[in-house]
Image (tube, rainbow, N blue to C red):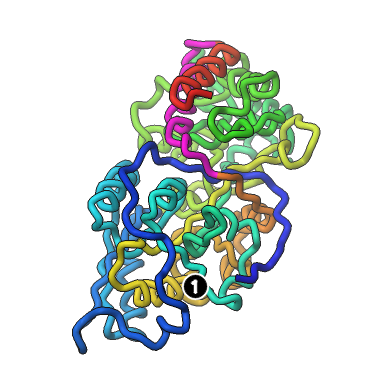
Amino acid sequence: MRRKTAMFLCASMAIGLLAGCGGGAGGNTPSESKEDKSTESSDKESGEKVKLTFWKSPHSDREDDIWAGMIEDFNKENPHIEVEFLNVAWDSVVEKETAAFSAGSGPDISFQTEQFPLYAKNGYLLSLDDYAEDEKLAGYPESALEYCSQDGKLMGIPFVALNSVMFYNKDMFEEAGITQVPTTWEELRETAKKLTQDKDGNGETDQWGMMFEMDDYWQPLSYIIQAGADMWNKNLTNIGFNNDQGVEGLTFFDQLYHEDQVVLPLEKYTNRDEERAYFYNGEVAMFPQQIHYTNIIKEASDINLGAFALPQGPAGDEEHAKWNFANIGMLSISSQTKYPDEAWKFVEFITRPEVEKIYLSEVGFFSPQLATNDMMYEGDEIMAVAAEGIKKLQVSPASDYANAMLQNLKIMYENVARGEKSPADAVQSMYDSMKAISGE
């Protein structure tokens, strides 16, 4: 398999979520050659429709409707194939997929992100090396194909790419006399201070410079990496930020909350909708989040929305200093499917640039294929900010201990945000928790 080489410079992440699957189910490579598969029909009765299942977690409130239209287009080209789409909630997808694969009844096709490495290691995913032609793969950067591979075998076709930006309320910036967006940590602190105000003069803050969603594991992590630390140790078994740089990054997060008091306090809300309402209603000025939140914000609010690149940190190298959470999602085929040829037809169809742009532009994503991105978002200043980051996207390796990482990140953030632990103690506590799980 020939792969096009490309350089991607800006750091991001893509890590494994799963903790312990059952035994393997089936091999992870097709038993027949590509040429044989193109001429032989699947093991089904003549004239009978092939039924495939496709599982994906939602990135839009209109997920079902979008896929219904795309599947209809696929069916017109492939009338002998019927695809059943199942919208699986994010908070249950790992549990449901693990159970299904372990029982030998996993979905024929699935959207995979962080959880794929252990699925691949357990033999649940089909290698696509014998399906994906060189011409198909030539449009993808090498880093995207490497992320979608396990032990040198391609386990999925890259489908979505995303990164993060700092959303901001343009009107609030103008009212505060701010004419330039911040580009460094110190500029971010000063900007947030100007935007944090007691608007009604009752002695209490009622407008904040920024907010973080505490259910979002990724955005506060940017400060840790931008200070010069790494996410993982060299064995990918524990955090790589149990050091001075990691503490420095988390200390900046702590300063925003407590010394500067520019972040919306956790006690002001009890759920994500309540928290987001502060931004939608013009009570919070800046909100770091993944780019596809553009559509979510625009649908929920009429604020004058803008975006800028995340301010860079003090690390000595650009890769760390400009770290920005990003990720790739891919379409994979189960090794358990009875109809790998037909499943590949669906994956190949959906990842055609002219087809995938339908989903991506509706949801607010980019594609790992730069040719697709050239078809979308012309004249959109917010998406243009993210597009620059996508061009420099670099995907980090996955880890078997990522699910533990995610859960412990949230605990660490909340301990600091609530003032329950110092940054140094919070980092050490997370390191100890990860060590108890991985042994390293």
Q: Can residue 248 be seen in the rendering of this structure?
A: yes
Q: Is residue 404 magenta?
A: yes
Q: Amino acid at mark 1?
A: Asp
* Up-down relation of residue 415 to residue 94 (above or below): above
Of 288 and 236, nearer the camera is: 236
The image position of residue 403, as x and y in percent, is 43, 35
Q: Is residue 139 left or right of residue 6?
A: left
Given residues 371 and 397, the one toward you in this image is 397
The residue wearing badge 1 is 130
Residue drawn at (32%, 46%) of the image = 23
What quarter of the picture does the C terminus occupy?
top right
How would you rate the neighbour count of disc 1 (Cα within 10 Å): few for under 14, some for 14-19, many for 20 or more?
Answer: some
Left/right of residue 203 with respect to residue 388 in the rendered view: left
Magenta residue span: 398-421
Residue 198's place in the image compared with 7, above or below, is above
Q: Is residue 385 above or below residue 270?
A: below
In this view, which residue lies farthest toward the right?
316
Relative to 217, is 11 on the left or the right? right
Residue 258, magenta (yes or no): no
Q: Is residue 362 visible?
A: no
Q: Is residue 385 left or right of residue 432?
A: right
User: Whole-percent x and y of residue 388?
Assistant: 68, 56
Q: Quadrant of the N terminus?
A: bottom right
Q: Residue at x 49, y 37 (%)?
A: 282
Q: Nearer the viewer, residue 283 or 422?
A: 422
Number of residue marks: 1
Q: Position of residue 216 (x, y in %)?
A: 46, 36
The residue at 51%/11% (across/down) is: 421
At 58% from the left and 62% from the top, the residue drawn is 368
Mark 1 residue element: loop
Main SS of the magenta part reads: helix
Q: Position of residue 285 (x, y in %)?
A: 56, 35
